[in-house]
Amino acid sequence: MEEKAITKEINKAKTTVHEIEHTDSELYKVGMYSTAAFAAAVGIWGLVCLSSAILENGAPVEMIKNLYHAITGA
């Protein structure tokens, strides 16, 4: 009866090709989610900067006018 238990433990230790491919796909998922999280953080930061610029200038139209004056030097 002990021989069967040893055989089962040896079979569990072997890694199959399917398990290796599954690990690769999991690593791709981690990379995808971390990239998406970073992109979301950059997008939120951009919205915060844009909203602070609008609040500083008083209105969106004023912000566009000030941007035009800054670019053209008028």
Image (tube, grey):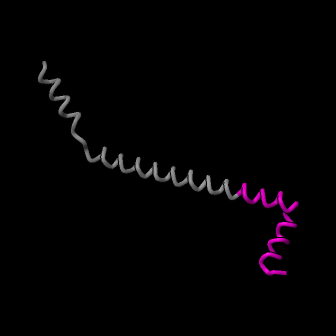
Vertical arrangement, residue 71 with respect to residue 37, above or below: below
Query: As drawn, is 23 to the left or to the right of 61?
Result: left
Q: Is residue 48 above or below residue 68?
A: above
- Magenta-colored span: 47-74
Confirm whether the magenta stretch covers residue 8. no
Where in the figure is residue 25, as x and y percent of width and height? 39, 50
* Corner quadrant of residue 63: bottom right
Q: x and y percent of residue 66 in the render?
A: 83, 71
Q: Nearer the viewer, residue 45 or 24?
A: 45
Count up the numbered dots. 0
Quarter the C terminus occupies:
bottom right
Quadrant of the rendered image containing residue 42: bottom right
> Is the N terminus in the top left, top right, bottom left or bottom right quadrant?
top left
Q: Is residue 25 left or right of residue 32?
A: left
Query: Residue 23: x, y in percent?
Result: 35, 46
Residue at screen point 81% across, 80% down: 73
